[in-house]
Image (tube, helix red, strand yellow):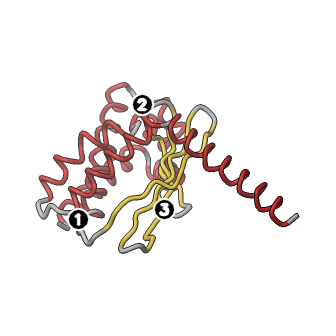
Amino acid sequence: MQITYSLVFLWILCSLVGSARASDNQYRVEIQKVDEFHQALLQVMQSANATEREKLLSPRVKTLYDVSSISRISVGRAWRSLTEGQKAEFVELLTELIVATYSDRFRDFDEQYFELLGTEPINKGVIIKTAINKRNEQLATLNYYFRGDQVFNVVANGISDLSLRRAEYGSIIKDQGYDQLVNQIKNKTSEIKASD
């Protein structure tokens, strides 16, 4: 009887592993995009020059992230009242901030490496679950939320970047206005670059 239970358990385990592999294979394009971005981050961490880091990151951020959607969701209702020129300016400013933030946070290489943890289908997309590790110790989980072929949100250690951004930006617009939000984003980007 014990052997029968063991065989059944083994069959279930193999089925789950096979299912996970099939799921990962289904989202190979999204996995590849995340992997290419992670490879760029590893290169960035080994560069002491901020300009080089940003030059390397900029095209990767634009390829991986749907900054237009992130901008629209982050600004909220105020987005509808913006002109096309203002929307384009905001997307450019937010892209610059994202690039500068990655360049600042990933600038010291000390044997870190990224690991694919799995995939999870969501409405109109998929979550690519990953982790950044150092010497077999997990430093953080990084879950990339895809809609279509680009990322609209990253959840790091359970904290949604998009939710934080939307709450912060919404509060600034409500209390100080849209123009002040633009100024604060410009100032934040300048501060990050000056800290290098």
Q: Disc 3 vs disc 1: which is toward the camera?
A: 3
- For badge 2, the amino acid type reads Leu
- For badge 3, the amino acid type reads Thr
Instruction: Tell me, for residue 82, which label it has, or none.
Output: 2
Q: Residue at x 84, y 66 (%)?
A: 2
Quadrant that contains the N terminus: bottom right
N-terminal of the pair, mark 2 or mark 1, is 2
Quadrant that contains the C terminus: bottom left
Q: Position of residue 174 (x, y in %)?
A: 52, 49
> To which quarter of the image does residue 58 belong?
top left
The reply to whether the C-beta atoms of the residues labelled 3 and 2 are less than 8 Å apart is: no
Foreground of the two, 94 or 139: 139
33 to the left or right of 20: left
> To which quarter of the image does residue 89 belong?
top left
Foreground of the two, 99 or 126: 126
N-terminal of the pair, mark 3 or mark 2, is 2
Is disc 1 surrounded by few (<14), some (14 to 19) or many (20+) residues within 10 Å? many
Instruction: Tell me, for residue 87, which label it has, or none.
Output: none
Foreground of the two, 183 or 127: 127
- Element under disc 3: strand
Q: Residue at x 32, y 27 (%)?
A: 85
Instruction: Tell me, for residue 107, which label it has, or none.
Output: 1
- Residue tagged by mark 3? 141
